[in-house]
Image (tube, rainbow, N blue to C red):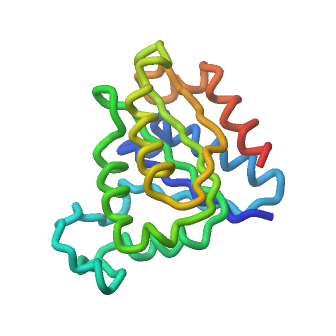
Amino acid sequence: MKNILIISASPRKGGNSDILCDRFAEGAGEKGHKVEKVFLASKNIGYCLGCGGCNSSNKCVQKDDMAEILDKMVKADVIVLATPVYFYSMDGQLKTFIDRTVPRYTEISNKDFYFIMTAADTHKDNLKRTLEGLRGFTQDCLEGAEEAGVIYGTGAWNIGEIKNTPAYNQAYEMGKQI
């Protein structure tokens, strides 16, 4: 049994990327894994202040929800990062979240990562910049991070449209394959 942490950066509960998170969780849960989803929009996470306070303490000076989520990341075996794609990049919620991992990013090691991206755009090649941003965080900054899978949820603008795309079943199957 693996400990799976899903980070849903959708600003819309039940939005397209959030729906794919739930499908992934459903598949992984059926295989007996422990799955937890964190919906970032419901959390209080401030922007990184760039103050350097965490450099010696490994703790952020801000007292918000990020410390609890960092604990979960360190303990997880598998981490799923899910974002809608806005202007060819991850949304602000996910970028802020990634920036705030600084106090303990060296402890987020030897994890399998899955990426879920959704966009109204119908061409998955247009999500390359978003994927490169996610890879920059995981592959270039985290020791032993392995990219285990990518889901391109293209062609979905309105809430729920993702259910009519191949990504809907791909998320479920990818979760089951862990």
Q: Nearer the viewer, residue 105 or 81?
A: 105
Q: Quadrant of residue 79?
A: bottom right
Q: Position of residue 48 (x, y in %)?
A: 23, 64
Identify the residue at horizontal 57%, vertical 65% (top origin).
109
Q: Is residue 176 left or right of residue 18?
A: right
Q: Position of residue 56 (x, y in %)?
A: 30, 84
Identify the residue at horizontal 59%, vertical 35% (top origin).
150
Q: Nearer the viewer, residue 107 or 29?
A: 107
Q: Position of residue 121 (x, y in %)?
A: 41, 16
Is 118 placed above or below 65 here?
above
Is 47 placed above or below 69 here?
above
Identify the residue at horizontal 33%, vertical 27% (top origin).
88
Q: Residue furthest bottom?
A: 57
Q: Quadrant of residue 12?
A: top left
Q: Position of residue 104 (x, y in %)?
A: 42, 73
Is 175 placed above or below 60 here?
above
